[in-house]
Amino acid sequence: MSETSRTLVIENARILDPSRSVDEIGTVIVEDGLIAAAGANALNQGAPEGAERIDASGLAVLPGLVDAQVFIGEPGGEHRETIRSASRAAAAGGVTSLLMMPDTNPVIDSLALAEFVMRTARETAVVNVHPAGALTRGLASEEMTEIGLMSEAGVTVFTNGRNTISNPALIRRIMTYARDYGALFMHETQDARLTGSGVMNEGLFASWLGLSGIPREAEIIPLERDLRLAALTGCRYHASKVSVATSAEVIRSAKARGGAISAGVSINNLSLNENDVGEYRTFFRLSPPLRSEDDRRAMVEALADGTLDVVVSAHDPQDVDGKRHPFSEAEVGAIGLETLLPAALRLHHSGDVPLPRLIEAMTSAPARLLQIDRGTLRPGKTADLVLVDLDAPFVFSEKRIHSRSKNTPFENARFQGKVMRTLVSGRTVYAEGEQGESA
Amino acid sequence: MSAPAPTPPFRHRHLLGIADLSPQEIEGLIDLAEAKVAVSRTREKEKTALRGRTQINLFFEASTRTQSSFELAGKRLGADVMNMSVGNSSVKKGETLIDTAMTLNAMQPDILVVRHHAAGAVALLARKVDCSVVNAGDGAHEHPTQALLDALTMRRHKGRVARLTVAICGDILHSRVARSNILLLNALGARVRAIGPSTLLPSGIASMGVEVFRRMEDGLKGADVVMMLRLQRERMEGSFVPSVREYFRYYGLDAAKLSHAKPDALVMHPGPMNRGVEIASDIADGPQSVIEEQVEMGVAVRMAVMETLLAEREAGR
């Protein structure tokens, strides 16, 4: 592994930096952990003496990915994932910054917990880990947390994690308060009552399986409510994961009315549909649930046209015991840090989403959301970057998984697009083919 | 007397659902069950097809009727039958399922009869054991032996299942009996109708191979078979329908509603019945009712199913 202080020259790479609308063959020069130059003309001054040179012919260099939704088990569920193991999985997936959800035990709902996570991340993580603060104490949707104190400590995003606050008066009050700190109000939009005992998309397929369905309106109604309240309060608002075609329309028209609103989509809802549940395959029990193929296509279109701003892995490690149950009793969620980029690149190879837009949705767009100075190859910025062979085919087998949990919906999936090397602050934290330390 | 083997051969290790079966396999099972009715009616019922075999009835959800029916079927074939009822209260839900499956598997049973409250649970368990598994009902998914016994009952009275008009009435949303019957009746070429308040019909019902009616008077017109479903008590009072009184008024089978069906229409119910909720007592006990006969056919069908599965297993070795 290279030292931070050394100069690194990455030559002959396809430089893809949507933050500067750059897509050209050129050179990236990394000095003291920062980008010194990145582009076709980077070598105008000549390569510095004694620099380490990487010939990146046939590879692309992207800004390191920023994943705006990652669940981690530490503290309280370290058997599922630690901050360290999640960071190694992230590095293997080309993710250099991640937003950690507050759904831990104890919940990240106080300054002390936020600082604990930041400290643990500094000491153990190989990528940048940003804790999101809880919107309500214990995620119980009753009392607001110390948003001011946590903001001052560097928390920029507040969310209720897996839970959706149902009380509109409480949402309004927290939005109003959060606005004073410039904090982002990020929310799942899944109405618990309307979801009821539902475990997968409502429709014919669920009916035949004898499983309770989750209607699309369980997402649309809270989303519409939130957007109205965001407009009322002027709070920065982000719908963390939407899944149905109507949600895209709702967001589109809300954006047309103005306001600081944005929305994300899980890679799962861009890649898979309800039929993947098959014969009660619990690795496909997700929230929001996998929807119909029409909904999936609508999500892809909304990503392509920018209605949906960011793509997240929604990484949610669950141990085997939690998934080895009948579908309706199995834990919800899938890991995704290591498959985010290759799964997203399917949308590039299929021609559905232009490559710059796709990369933007995983780099500069989420960086803006988190208010972090990342997701770019602009000279002077921190050298978080990833070398990718955009066309290399590979099969994602269980033995590749760095995450402590193995609940991937992409087991044995064929991908085209492989992370070859990941750098954080100029330091290599992952290199394909090198035996990594096990998490 | 040796029973005729079903033709063509039955190529499944388990019976998990009607969805897995071809029309020929369904007919084969019903043919064999027909022969088992005769066996059951003789004085000397003791047969030897399952002698020395171990059958375990594993019920995660209580059901005296179905469990007794499987027990009797096994005993009439000469099997050693053990009943296990696993309460949901003591252990965390689901945790027992795979653990119990592994434990039972170590006891080397030949056949496991399983009922579970979760859809897909029986198939999950079947993947963990070496023996044959019969689904005795999994959540709102399937209850294949019920559909087979219903078809046998219809065929004995009407001579065939094809082209019969069968009206399935009531709580189709939560009913595994309805799903298995819709699959089986379609496979054998019957015309299937679904009648119920919209709160008790599953999403996409119109694409499930049925004609949907909201009024009993319309849906029963010209029906050959009227199949009533049980309405669970917790769904009667305000959650899915407003009251028992209102439900009975619109969906309870009484003489007036039954008069819209063919005069010789069969009245069926998988039991246990809620008299005065989904069916009037005089209809349940009336001349068109074949509800008791369904119980008898249940034993015959379960004998046929278990004998077929074990014959397949032995042939496969």
Image (tube, coloured by chain):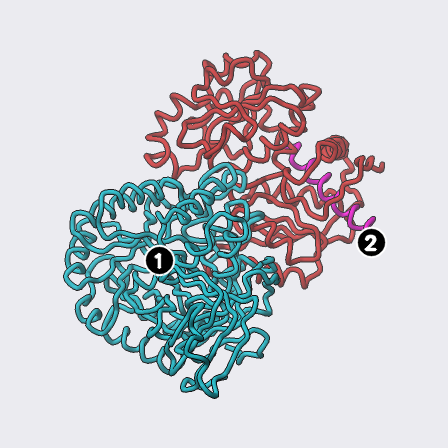
Chain colours: A cyan, B red
Is A41 rendered above or below residue B188?
A: below
Residue B314 counted in the magenta span: yes
Give x and y (percent) for residue B20. Answer: 66, 40
Q: Could you tell me the amino acid type at mark 2?
A: Arg
Question: Which residue: 49% across, 23% down?
Answer: B212
Question: Which residue: 29% across, 46% down?
Answer: A222
Is B204 rendered above or below residue A96?
A: above
Task: Determine the chain carrying the residue at label 1.
Answer: A
In terms of secondary structure, where does tag 1 sit? loop
- Write the start and end of the magenta stretch as one range: B295-317
Residue B120 counted in the magenta span: no
Give x and y (percent) for residue A372. Answer: 30, 68
> Which of the numbered marks, if any, corresponds to residue B317?
2
Q: Could you tell me the amino acid type at mark 1?
A: Arg
Question: Which residue: 23% across, 71% down?
Answer: A110
Where residue B183 sits, quadrant-wise, is top right
Label 1: which residue?
A162
| Residue B88 as seen in the image, left or right of residue B103 | left
Secondary structure mostly seen in the magenta stretch: helix
Q: Is residue B184 visible?
A: yes
Mark 1 residue crowding within 10 angstroms, few (<14) / some (14–19) / many (20+): some
| Residue A155 as seen in the image, left or right of residue B254 | left
Q: Is residue A212 visible?
A: no
* Labels 2, 1: front one: 1
Separation of marks 2 and 1 at Cα, in angstroms:
50 Å
